Image: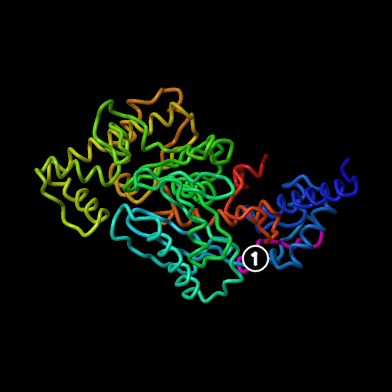
């Protein structure tokens, strides 16, 4: 038989953690608020809120943020999360480079480092070396001590397999079960690590702070060199059985169509990913390339050329059509309240072609589902993946109720607090 005293202590610890998490999440997403407001927002008693906020203030995680008048009584003290309590780092592992960005606890950027990659299909060790070097550089650039950093979130292309070890599967890059956490430890990184697919970290960023805020059912589409999506249902990112949900770019839009980098034919990515869009233009122009040193500059040149070139205009029109059909598939499958189009290529294309994309969506989506969906551009810009990666250690801290000790390093929980779920 188990020890009743131990069981009781464990129950009390869990209750304390849940109460702290509820209060801290409300303060994080809705602060500054008063203790009286927290009672209504959390459903906890005034005594519990007073005890929890007292502990959080004593620990330095919460600070006073001024006074607000109350009806006929003393002014109420406002509380908010202390942005200087610690720092978090967000990393975007892209196919063109590694971005390493340092933020305070409320995700205000303090420093950023970008390390280009010489090939769109780098080997894992090259990426690990760039992450480890970027971490050292950004910590020095931010002028902070490593001991004050709460954790490092990393957005990676491909699927992050949950388990005792974080294994990364990225078929288009030739990565199969790469033990990224182990490799980073061997490279000397000792900070708590959190991994997720880059599209999902972007989705988390837009859900918390951008165009997805306040929506319980949304899809955040990431279009860069590759294509992915974060599916948000009931305010949480849907992971699937093995965390590979959201590989939207590898859904088939043309049976037996263009060859995709994954090896299959007819994938959406083979028609709307930046690499494929530029390749379609080259083929139409008999191998004549666009000016520019990288994919971003060449895509910008293609968009600019469309004003005078019928070939460039046709390629972009076709791209808008395929992208609209792909978004319509998302609407028909998931019935979201909002579709957010992001990623550096998605924003570049969407800025000039959103009406055409919406027109294609309307031609392919079921009318009833479409009527309940709005389609908007992401609000956080091309840095949304790193921005969202930084929310992974913050989410873990909120879920632990502010306890710095990470019980499951490298393994974020599937359901984390968000502005859309703190109401439930």
Which residue in the structure is indicated by mark 1?
82
Instruction: Classify mark 1: helix, strand or loop.
Output: loop
The residue range painted magenta reads 72-85
- Residue nearer the viewer, 140 or 61: 140
Q: Position of residue 92 (x, y in %)?
A: 43, 56
Side (left or right) of 56 relative to 386: right
Total marks shown come to: 1
Q: Quadrant of residue 404?
A: bottom right
Q: Which quadrant does the N terminus fall into?
A: top right
Left or right? Give the position of 256 relative to 385.
left
Q: For this view, does 251 lie left or right of residue 310?
A: right
The picture quadrant where one finds residue 94 is bottom left
Q: Is residue 323 above or below residue 422?
A: above
Residue 238 drawn at (x, y percent): 53, 38
Is 335 above or below relative to 93?
A: above
Magenta-span inclusion, residue 411: no
Quarter of the image with the C terminus in it:
top right
Label 1: how many Cα within 10 Å (few below 14, some 14–19, many 20+): many
| Up-down relation of residue 54 to residue 146 (above or below) | above
**What residue lies at 28% left-to-right and 46% top-to-bottom?**
274
Relative to 298, is 267 on the left or the right?
Answer: right
């Amino acid at each position: 038989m188990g020890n009743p005293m131990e069981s009781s202590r464990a129950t009390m610890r869990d209750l304390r953690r849940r109460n702290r998490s509820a209060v801290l999440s409300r303060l994080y997403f809705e602060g500054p608020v008063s203790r009286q407001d927290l009672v209504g927002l959390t459903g906890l008693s005034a005594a519990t809120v007073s005890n929890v906020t007292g502990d959080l203030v004593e620990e330095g995680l919460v600070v006073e943020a001024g006074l607000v008048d109350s009806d006929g009584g003393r002014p109420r003290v406002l509380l908010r999360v202390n942005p200087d309590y610690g720092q978090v780092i967000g990393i975007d592992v892209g196919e063109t480079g590694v971005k390493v960005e340092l933020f305070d606890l409320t995700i205000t950027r303090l420093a950023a480092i970008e390390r280009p990659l010489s090939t769109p299909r780098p080997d894992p060790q090259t990426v690990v070396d760039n992450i480890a070097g970027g971490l050292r550089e950004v910590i020095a650039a931010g002028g902070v001590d490593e001991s004050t950093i709460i954790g490092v979130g990393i957005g990676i292309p491909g699927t992050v397999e949950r388990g005792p070890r974080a294994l990364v599967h990225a078929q288009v890059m030739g990565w199969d079960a790469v033990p990224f956490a182990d490799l980073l430890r061997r490279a000397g990184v000792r900070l708590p690590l959190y991994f997720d697919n880059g599209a999902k970290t972007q989705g988390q960023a837009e859900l918390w702070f951008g165009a997805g805020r306040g929506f319980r059912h949304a899809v955040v589409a990431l279009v860069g060199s590759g294509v992915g999506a974060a599916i948000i249902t009931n305010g949480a990112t849907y992971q699937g059985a093995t965390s590979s949900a959201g590989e939207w770019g590898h859904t088939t839009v043309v049976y037996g169509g263009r060859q995709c980098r994954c090896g299959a034919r007819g994938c959406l990515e083979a028609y709307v990913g930046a690499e494929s869009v530029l390749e379609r233009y080259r083929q139409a122009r008999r191998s004549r390339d666009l000016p520019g040193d990288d994919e971003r500059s060449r895509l910008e040149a293609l968009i600019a050329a469309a004003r005078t070139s019928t070939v460039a205009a046709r390629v972009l029109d076709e791209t808008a059509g395929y992208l609209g059909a792909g978004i319509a598939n998302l609407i028909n499958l998931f019935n979201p309240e909002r579709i957010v189009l992001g990623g550096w290529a998605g924003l570049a294309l969407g800025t000039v072609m959103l009406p055409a994309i919406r027109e294609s969506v309307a031609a392919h989506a079921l009318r009833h589902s479409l009527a309940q969906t709005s389609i908007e551009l992401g609000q956080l810009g091309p840095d949304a993946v790193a921005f969202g990666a930084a929310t992974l250690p913050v989410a873990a801290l909120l879920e632990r109720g502010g306890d710095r000790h990470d019980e499951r390093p490298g393994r974020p929980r599937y359901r984390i607090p968000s502005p859309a779920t703190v109401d439930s």
